[in-house]
Image (tube, helix red, strand yellow):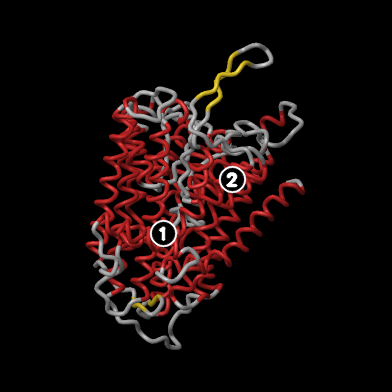
Amino acid sequence: MSGANWLQLLALVGVVVATTRRLGPYLARALDGGPTFGDRVFLPVERVVYRIVGVDPSREQPWTVYALSLLAFSGVSVLGLFLLQRLQGALFLNPTDVAGVPPALAFNTAASFVTNTNWQNYGGESTMSNLTQMSGLAVQNFVSAAVGIAVAVALIRGLTRRRSATIGNFWVDVTRVTTRVLLPGAAVVALVLASQGVVQNLGGFTDATTVEGASQSIPGGPIASQEAIKELGTNGGGPYNANSAHPFENPNGFTNLLEMWALLAIPFGLTFAFGRLVGDQRQGWALFAAMFVLWLASAGVAMGFEVAGNPLVEERGATDAGNYEGKEVRFGPAASGLFAASTTGTSTGSVIAAHDSFTPLGGAVPLVNIMLGEVSPGGVGAGLYGILIFALLAVFIAGLMVGRTPEYLGKKIQATEMKLVVLYLLIVPTLILTLASVSVVLANPKSSILNPGAHGLSEVVYAFTSAANNNGSAFGGLTGNTDWYNTTLGLAMLAGRFLPIVLVLAIAGSLARKQPVPTTAGTFPTGTPLFAGLLVGVILIMVGLTYFPVLALGPLLEQLGI
C-alpha cells in the first residue's frame, strides 16, 4: 500500500484510540444515571417524556418485564413505520410525489430500520418522501440504536448487582441514551457534515441543464441530519441509493474519515464505559483489545487484497494493480477496503463501494466480519453485549481446563447461563444457513442471483448473514426486492435481533440474582492480555467451525478459480 493509504489507516486508529479514552467516561456517567454536562437541558425533557408515556423513572423492572417492554416498543415501531410508508403518498412533506410503498417492501423496510439493520431494497431518493425519511427512518435510527445500548447496560447491571431481582427500567434507559448520547452527538456530526457540503434541506429534485444541454434532476432532502445518526448509531441506511458513495452524503476524504470514526466511536467507547461501570478498567481494556485486534486485522486484509487487485486483470495488460471495479474513484481501493471492514465490523452496513465487486478474499472480509456477530467492535450496544456473551463462553472453557467453576467479574457461570449462551450462539447461524439453503434450491429465489457458481452462493449467504446479524450491507448482485426476499429477510432481521436480545436479558436477570464470590488465587483473571487473546481465539474458532463449509464453497472456491 502507498504512504497515503498507511497514513489514512493510522489517522483512523489514532482518533479512535484517543476518543475512546475521552468518550468512555461520559458514556459511563450517562448510562449510570450520573451527572452530565447537559442536565439542565435534558432533565426537563426527560421528565416530560416520562409523564407523557406514564413511566415512573424510579421504578425498576425484572428482566421479563424489561424484555416485554422492549418487544412491545419495537412491535409498535414496526407497525407505525409500515403504515407511514404505505400512506406516504397521501401525506405532506412529499415534494417528489412518491407513492405508497408496496406491502412486502414496506414490511421489509420497517423490520429493517426497527432492528437497526437498515437493509434497503429500494432507492431512497425515488421511494421515500421527506416525511418518511425524517419522522420514520431517522427516528428509528435513534431509538433502535438506543435499544441496543439499553440491553448492554442491562447486562452490565446483571454482572455488577448483588441478589437483585431487577436490571433497570427499559423506558428510562432508552430515553437517557437518546437524549444524552445520540441526539447531541448526531447534532455535532450533522453540523460538520453540512459544513463540508452534505445536503440539508426539505426540497425534492432540482431540475438543471448541463453544459451539453441535457436535463438533470438533482436530489435534495434532509441528508446531513440522517447521515450523522446513520453512522453514529451504526444504522447504515442512506437517504440515497448509492449510500455513502454518493457525493451528497460523503463529499470528500475528510467526511469519509469522519464517517468511519463516527461508526466506530460509540462501540469502542462503550468498552471503556464498561470498565468504569464494573469498577475495573482493565476489564474494559481487555474487551477493547479483542475488538481492536479483530477490526484492525480485517481492515488490513481487505485493504491489502483490494490494493493488490485481480491477477486476471493484470494478465490482460492492466497497469494499475488496484481493484477499481465497483469503487468510487474519489476514495479508491484502500479506503474502500477500510470502510468495508469498519462498516461490517460494526452493524452499520453503509458502503462507499460495491462489496459484490471486491476480490473474492477481499469480499470475504465483510462477510466474515458479519459472521463474527459483529463484535469487532459491533453495533452500538450490540457489539458490547455480543462480546460479553463470548467472554462468558471463554471463561467457561478456561474453567473446564483447570477444573474450576468458571467465574466472570465475581459471578459464577453455571448451567443456566451456559444454556442461554449456547442458544444465543446458535440462533443466528441457524437462521442464516437454513434460509440461504432454501433460497439456493427454490427456482424463484435462484432467479434473483446475478452471478452463477460460487459468487452467486456468496450473494445469497451474504444477504441472510447481513439481515440476521442486523448489518444491512449487501452483495449488490442479488435482486432483493422480491416478495420472497423482502419477506424472508424481514423475518430474519426480526428473529436475529429480538431472540438474542431476550436471551441476553435472561442472562442478565440470572446473573443479577447471584451473590458475587470473592476472588481467590485460583480465579482466572479476565482483565489481562492473556484473556483478550483467549477471547479472540474463542470467537474465531466458534465462527470458523460454524461457517467454514459455506465459506469454502463461496469466496474460497472463487479465489482458487482465479
Measuring from the top left, give residue 555's x and y in whole percent.
52, 40
Residue pictured at 38% horizontal, 77% vertical: 407
Decide which of 344, 530 is in the foreground and name it: 344
In terms of secondary structure, where does tag 1 sit? helix
The image shows residue 334, relative to residue 21, as above or below, that is above
CB under 8 Å between callouts 2 and 1?
no
* Quadrant in which residue 57 is drawn: bottom left
Decide which of 430, 201 is in the foreground and name it: 201
What residue did someone put label 2 on?
339
Q: Which mark is residue 94?
A: none
Measuring from the top left, give residue 194's x and y in whole percent.
59, 41
Task: Give the amino acid type for the residue marked by disc 1 in the picture.
Answer: Val
Residue 544 seen: no
The image shows residue 344, relative to residue 560, as above or below, that is below
Residue 126 seen: yes
Q: Is residue 371 left or right of residue 429?
A: right
Q: Neighbour class for label 2 at 10 Å: few (<14), some, many (≥20)? A: many
Mark 2 or mark 1: which comes first in sequence?
1
Q: Looking at the rendering, in which quadrant would you find the C terminus?
A: top right
Task: Give the amino acid type for the residue marked by disc 2 in the picture.
Answer: Phe
What residue did someone put label 1 on?
177
* Quadrant in which residue 335 is drawn: top right
* Quadrant in which residue 83 is drawn: top left
Residue pictured at 61% horizontal, 44% vertical: 337
| Residue sticking out furthest to the top | 213
The image shows residue 82, relative to residue 150, as above or below, that is above
The number of numbered badges drawn on the structure is: 2
Residue pictured at 46% horizontal, 29% vertical: 123
Measuring from the top left, give residue 30's x and y in whole percent.
44, 66
Measuring from the top left, give residue 273's x and y in whole percent.
48, 68
Q: Nearer the viewer, mark 2 or mark 1?
A: 1
